[in-house]
Image (cartoon, rainbow, N blue to C red):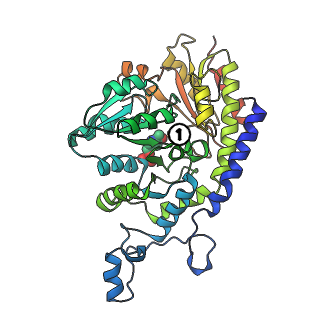
Amino acid sequence: MDAMTYDAKLRARAETLATTCIHGGDGAVPYGATDVPVVLASAFRFDDAETAAAAFQGANDAWIYGRWGNPTVNHLESRLAAVEGAEAVAVTSSGMAAIAGTMLGLFSADDHLLAPVAMYAESARLLRERLPRHRITTTFVHAEDVDQWKASLTPHTRALYIETPANPTLTVTNIAAAVAFAKAHGLLVIADNTFATPFCQTPLELGVDVVLHSATKALSGHGDVVGGVVAGSRALVDRIREYTVKGLGAVMPPLSAFLVERGVRTFALRQEQANRHAARLSAALEKHPGVVRVHHPSRPSHPQHALAAEQMHAFGSMLAFEVAPAGGRDAIGTGRAVLEALRIATHAVSLGDARTLVVHSASTTHSTMPADVRRAAGVADGLLRLSVGLESYASLETDLLTALDAAKVSA
Ligand SMILES: *Cc1c(COP(=O)(O)O)cnc(C)c1O
């Protein structure tokens, strides 16, 4: 896809979402306020004894207590349901609360899951180390190898977990194939859609049962809040909400809900620009002689470029690139030298921020993995992960190319 065609596609996607981001799921707002007030009450007054009794029977979705529901938090949930195209959404205290709460809310001892080898490191730890203490076990499979999924099925397998594009390799899983496989074997499909965001990908439309997000990232978009999202059918979301929000108490605070909702208002516009710049930067980096590989679904060199073009509305604002050993340093040393020469891209974890963020995955986010497991998962020693922010294109390109030269990567 040439750059002009892609730009037009991004514009069309932003047009589709922009109004929903500002008005979607709007309900009544008190005081004539244009946007929902931040309601910090931990308990809500009952009009009379009968209303109280009815509220406890679930009448009118009445607000009772802050852990069970809050006007600011529920308003955000309606907005996000509209943006994600979901019947229902529950928000949680963090992305990990959404992920762990979904697993604990839906599965029990002796249940078995399938999950990809390349995934968010803390999610991998949850499945590898923490859930087995509750006798919920996981077999890790290569996301592109359906035969391996099939071979890993047991009579106790309940769900297929996917994360596409994956962190930080941008490996793409075929969502339609995952859904077809799951339907054939009576499994749920759960997708972590944080990297893609609902701008780039809408897995529920493709038949996925539960979509999870870290709202900490592009949905809020300003690096000032931690939160999580569970989206899906009302029946599934209610089950997860009961367990996670009511039961574990992983509630999103009203101030956080306000910050996420404020971020969502500009989500479509922010994503349009970040996606455009990420594709252009990927092309520019691929031309640099010191860059041995660029990982971005927009590049024809990406092994699943065609699949990504088919199942994604846009290729995303996350990219990674690899540098080789140079100037007497190993690949890890070269990667770090590039990192330290960057002036605009900020050296920090997280993603989806207005700032461009960069990390050296092998020595930070993926350092708890044994080196051979990490490399097998595609996280090369010299890999830098970039979350493209909202700075001018020219300043970002100059920053990256100058840093590559300063670190003498092609020497
Ligand atoms: C950040 C992230 C999470 C975890 O979300 P938190 O809000 O940090 O708990 C999960 N999955 C992916 C892909 C992420 O990037």
- Asked if residue 170 is positioned above or below residue 93 in the image, the reply reads above
Q: How many marks?
A: 1
Q: Which of the pair 90/130 is nearer the observer?
A: 90
In percent of width and height, residue 394 lies at 75, 34
Q: Looking at numbered disc 1 in the image, what kind of residue is underneath it?
A: Phe
In percent of width and height, residue 395 lies at 72, 36
Outermost residue toward the right in this view: 4
Q: Quadrant of the C terminus?
A: top right
Q: Quadrant of the N terminus?
A: top right
Query: In the image, 212: left or right of 303?
Result: left
- Asked if residue 183 is positioned above or below residue 23 in the image, the reply reads above
In percent of width and height, residue 284 lies at 70, 25
Q: Which of the pair 293/231 is nearer the observer?
A: 231
Outermost residue toward the bottom in this view: 48
At 37% from the left and 21% from the top, the residue drawn is: 373
| Label 1 residue near ligand 1, CB within 8 Å | yes
At 69% from the left and 25% from the top, the residue drawn is: 283
Snapshot quadrant of residue 399: top right
Q: Quadrant of ligand 1?
A: top left
Residue 402 is at least partly visible in this image? no
Crowding at dot 1, Cα within 10 Å, few <14 / some 14-19 / many 20+, comes out as: many
In percent of width and height, residue 343 lies at 64, 34
- Asked if residue 334 is positioned above or below residue 194 in the image, the reply reads above
Query: In the image, 400: left or right of 127?
Result: right
Snapshot quadrant of residue 341: top right
Residue 26 is at least partly visible in this image? yes
Q: Which of the pair 281/104 is nearer the observer?
A: 104
Determine which residue is flagged by label 1: 195
Q: Secondary structure at mark 1?
A: loop
